[in-house]
C-alpha cells in the first residue's frame, strides 16, 4: 500500500495520521476476508495513496469479497460502488443503484437541501501580514520554509502525506521545537519566541489539530468542560471552576456554532464528528486568537457540516483573523483559499494565487520535491558506485 519506505520496526504511534491509516488498511487486506467495511478510509490520504487503495479494492472484488465503503467523498463512491445507501439524521433515505445518482443529487439527499460547488465568503478586507514565517526548519521534516499570511486571508497548505504539513503547524504552535527559523506576528512584523503551546496561545495563535479525538478533545468529559479547557481564567477563581459560568460559556458556543446536542452536559464522545469539531473550534473562538491554524478541519465530517465550517472560516476572515488551513482535499482548498502553498518533501515548492492555479499544477508541485530528492539520491549512488 505504498509504505515500502518506512522501516517495519517503526512504532505506529510515531507515524502521522495518514501513515497510521495506511497501516490499518494494510492489516485488513491480509487473510481470508469475506466482508470488508471501510469507514472513511481515504479521509487522511492524498491522491497517490487513494489510487493504491482502489487497486486493492479492485483485487478484493475480483476475489469475491463484499465491501461496504463509507465515505463523504462522493466522487470515490462513483468509482467503487455498485449500489448506494444514504443516511440522514439516522434514517435511511435511499438504497439505489449508484448509476441512478450524480454527486449533486446525493448531496441533496444527505443534507435535505441543495449545496453549490461555490462558497461566498462574503465581503472581506485583506490587510497586512499577521503571521510571517522565515526559514523554519526541523530535521528533514520541515526544511527552510518561509511564507506570510495576511489578516483576513485564508492561506491553504497542500501536499502529499509525509510532506511536512502537520509538522509545520506544530512548529508554529510550539508543539515541536524548530532547529532554526523565526516566527513573527503583526505588521510591522515582530519576532516572537515560541517554545511551547503556552507561548503560542499567549501570543494569540490557535491550533485545531488533525486528530481531534486524540489531541483536541477529552472524550469522557462534557461539552462544557471541553469548551472551558482553553478559557479557565474566565470561568474560575481561586482555583475553583464556577459551574454556572462554565455552562453559560458552553451555551454561547453551542448557539453560535450550531452544535447539535441535548445539553452542555452531554459527553463529547456522544456527538457526531462534525459537532465534535465545532466544539474544538468553539473553544478557540472564546479566546479571540488573531492567527488560527486548522489541520484537516473537515476530516471525516458530513457535507452539511463541512459547509457550516466553511461559512465559519469566512466569518473569521471578516473579523480580520489570519487562517492557515491544511487539507488533503485539493478541491476543498481551491474552494475556500485565497492562496495555496504546496509542500513537497518538507520544502515549500510554490505558492499559487486564487484563479491562477489548476489542480494539475498543484499536484505537479506536490511531487516536485520528491522528484528532485530522488534525482539527488540517484546521483549520489552513481558517484559512490564510480
Image (cartoon, rainbow, N blue to C red):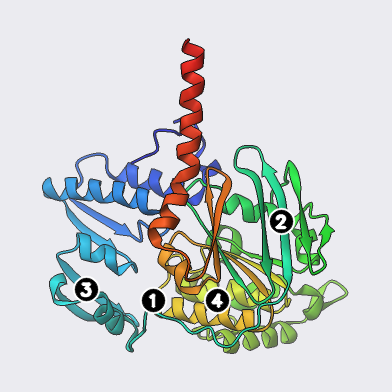
Name the image quarter holding the N terminus. Answer: top left
**Does residue 350 appear anywhere in the picture?**
yes
Of the residues tagged 4 and 1, which is closer to the observer? 1
Q: Name the residue tied to disc 3.
A: 85
* Label number found at residue 303: 1
Image spot of residue 139 (x, y percent): 65, 37
Q: Earlier in the sequence, mark 2 or mark 4?
A: 2
Q: Earlier in the sequence, mark 2 or mark 3?
A: 3
Q: Name the residue tied to disc 2.
A: 133
Q: Is residue 302 left or right of residue 275?
A: left
Determine whether 244 is above or below 298 in the image: below
Between the residue at mark 4 and the residue at mark 1, the CA separation in whole angstroms equals: 14 Å
Q: Is residue 56 left or right of residue 269?
A: left
Q: Earlier in the sequence, mark 4 or mark 3?
A: 3
Are discs 2 and 3 less than 8 Å apart at CB? no
Determine whether 72 is above or below 89 in the image: above
Image spot of residue 230 (x, y percent): 72, 71
Q: Is residue 62 left or right of residue 287?
A: left
Q: Residue at x 55, y 71 (%)?
A: 338
Q: Name the residue tied to disc 4.
A: 278
Between the residue at mark 1 and the residue at mark 2, the CA separation in whole angstroms equals: 33 Å
Between the residue at mark 2 and the residue at mark 4, the CA separation in whole angstroms equals: 28 Å
Between the residue at mark 3 and the residue at mark 1, the CA separation in whole angstroms equals: 15 Å
Q: Residue furthest front?
A: 356
Which is nearer the eye, 160 or 128?
128
Q: Residue at x 25, y 76 (%)?
A: 86
Image spot of residue 249 (x, y percent): 69, 84
Image spot of residue 384 (x, y percent): 51, 13
Instruction: Name the element at disc 1.
Output: helix
The quarter holding residue 180 reads top right
Which is nearer the eye, 8 or 352?
352
Amino acid at each position: 500500500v505504498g509504505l515500502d519506505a518506512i522501516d517495519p520496526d517503526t512504532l505506529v504511534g510515531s507515524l502521522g495520521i495518514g501513515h497510521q491509516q495506511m497501516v490499518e488498511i494494510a492489516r485488513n487486506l491480509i487473510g481470508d476476508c469475506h466482508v470488508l467495511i471501510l469507514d472513511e478510509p481515504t479521509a487522511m490520504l492524498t491522491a497517490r495513496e487513494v489510487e493504491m487503495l482502489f487497486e486493492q479494492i479492485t483485487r478484493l472484488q475480483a476475489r469475491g469479497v463484499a465491501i461496504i465503503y463509507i465515505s463523504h467523498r462522493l466522487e470515490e463512491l462513483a468509482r467503487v460502488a455498485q449500489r448506494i445507501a444514504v443516511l440522514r439524521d439516522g434514517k435511511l433515505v435511499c438504497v439505489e443503484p449508484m448509476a441512478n445518482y450524480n454527486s449533486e443529487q446525493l448531496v441533496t439527499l444527505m443534507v435535505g437541501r441543495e449545496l453549490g460547488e461555490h462558497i461566498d465568503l462574503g465581503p472581506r478586507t485583506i490587510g497586512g501580514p499577521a503571521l510571517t514565517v522565515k526559514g523554519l526548519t526541523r530535521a528533514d521534516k520541515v526544511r527552510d520554509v518561509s511564507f506570510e499570511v495576511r489578516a483576513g486571508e485564508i492561506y491553504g497548505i497542500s501536499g502529499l502525506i509525509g510532506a511536512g504539513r502537520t509538522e509545520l503547524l506544530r512548529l508554529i504552535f510550539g508543539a515541536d521545537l524548530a532547529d532554526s527559523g523565526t516566527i513573527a506576528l503583526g505588521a510591522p512584523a515582530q519576532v516572537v519566541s515560541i517554545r511551547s503551546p503556552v507561548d503560542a496561545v499567549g501570543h494569540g495563535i490557535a491550533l485545531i489539530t488533525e486528530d481531534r479525538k486524540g489531541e483536541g478533545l477529552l472524550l469522557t468529559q462534557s461539552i462544557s468542560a471541553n469548551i472551558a479547557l482553553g478559557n479557565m481564567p474566565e470561568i474560575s477563581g481561586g482555583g475553583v471552576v464556577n459551574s454556572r459560568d462554565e455552562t453559560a460559556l458552553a451555551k454561547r458556543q453551542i448557539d453560535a456554532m450550531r452544535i447539535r446536542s441535548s445539553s452542555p452536559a452531554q459527553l463529547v464522545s456522544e456527538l457526531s464528528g462534525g459537532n465534535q469539531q465545532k466544539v474544538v473550534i468553539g473553544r478557540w473562538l472564546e479566546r479571540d486568537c488573531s492567527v488560527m491554524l486548522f489541520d484537516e478541519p473537515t476530516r471525516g465530517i458530513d457535507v452539511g457540516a463541512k459547509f457550516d465550517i466553511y461559512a465559519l472560516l469566512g466569518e473569521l476572515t471578516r473579523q480580520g483573523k489570519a487562517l492557515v488551513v491544511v487539507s488533503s482535499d485539493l478541491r476543498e482548498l481551491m474552494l475556500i483559499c485565497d492562496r495555496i502553498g504546496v509542500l513537497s518533501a518538507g520544502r515549500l515548492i510554490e505558492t499559487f494565487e486564487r484563479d491562477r492555479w489548476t489542480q494539475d499544477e498543484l499536484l505537479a508541485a506536490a511531487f516536485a520535491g520528491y522528484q528532485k530528492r530522488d534525482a539527488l539520491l540517484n546521483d549520489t549512488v552513481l558517484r559512490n558506485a564510480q
